Amino acid sequence: MRVFHHPDLSLHDPQFFLMRGRIVPCFETPARAAALLEGARTSGLEIVTPDTVAPARLGSIHDEEYLRFLREGLRDWSAQPNAGPEIVPNMHPTPEMIAQGAMRGAGIVSRAGWYMADTACAIGEGTWASSLAAACCADAASRDVVSGARAAYAACRPPGHHAYAARAGGHCFLNNSALAAANLRAGGAARVAVLDIDSHHGNGTQGIFWDDASVLTVSVHGDPNHYYPWFVGHAHETGGVEGSNLNLPLPRHAGDGPWIEAVTKGAEAVRRFGAEALVLALGFDASKDEPLGFLDVSDDAFARAGAIAASLSLPTVIVQEGGYAVASLPRLLGRFLAGFSAG
Ligand SMILES: [Zn+2]
């Protein structure tokens, strides 16, 4: 298995993170990129720097004006009097406004509120470069699999699964897992599944493929009644095309037993769907080591999850999502990849 990693992954260095009314250091740190690389190296895998993703492939997932906002918005933000160093939205259209014809304005405050779901995706100097580098990793890894590799690992950072077609949120800007799934579809797989085992609901991926019967999205995550993304991730969200989405929410402090049971149930759904290729959206924040933890999953369970994914015997793109216990990341990645290789 080849690993796709890019030197620009560490350029994004968000300073603003709002937690319970306080500004605290952001958990999604540049050090995560090096930790993932260390884990891949220790596993003895070949590391490859990807080519730049073709704009048309990014455009197959994301809205053009949204991409322009990510690329160029900081310039307009910085031109405001007394502007802070990062784009942080402070006003969003509400459901009532949208129901009554709300529109995105041309100004940067309007665009920030429109294109950003929350304050956990501050856009600074290095944000676009790192987001693009992460997308390049997912793009190259998926093309490697389309070309015949059994599996490839995209060491994406920042993560992507909370990003919708035209909305950033929860540390995510470009949806790397969705890009990989779209590439697998374009590469000839008639049906593709995304199995997301990050501890947060993969809401952006669900949103992107909501009306697409050829892509099954499955997410195993903490109960959104008590955990990000707070509003979606419920079991009743079964897809715009009935049965094309499966959410498996778990209660706080769920450990290996219920987590593995849910991952197994997710894998069974992938099999029933008749997927010809798989995107495994890999987060490590279900780990018991996680600083803002909700689930209590052991290292052994990550190895078992790797084996469960491998047991589907599908061409597989493993795309890195979250996981913020930086010191644990090399070890957790090593355990998952070892489980996958043995499975
Ligand atoms: Zn997460």
Image (cartoon, rainbow, N blue to C red):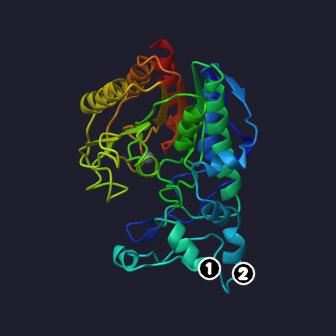
Q: Is mark 2 within 8 Å of ligand 1?
A: no
Q: Which residue is mark 1?
A: 106
Query: Which residue is under mark 2?
Result: 79
Residue at horizontal 45 percent and vertical 75 percent from the top: 92
Residue drawn at x 42%, y 79% as measured from the top left: 101
Amino acid at the residue labelled 2: Ala
Q: Earlier in the sequence, mark 1 or mark 2?
A: 2
Q: Local crowd at mark 1 within 10 Å, few (<14), some, or many (≥20)?
A: few
> Is there any visible trace of residue 39 in the rendered image?
no
Q: Can you say whether 193 is above or below 13 in the image?
A: above
Q: Is residue 237 above or below residue 268?
A: below
Distance, label 1 to label 2, CA atoms, is 14 Å
Query: Looking at the picture, which amino acid does disc 1 mark?
Result: Ala
Query: Which quarter of the rendering shows the N terminus?
Result: top right
SS assignment at label 2: loop
- Occupied quadrant, residue 84: bottom right
Badge 1 marks a residue whose secondary structure is loop
Left or right, 18 with respect to 3, comes to left
Left or right of 6? Residue 26 is: left
Q: x, y percentage for residue 137? A: 65, 38
Which residue is pictured at 49% across the width and 59% down the height?
169
Task: Give the number of marks.
Answer: 2
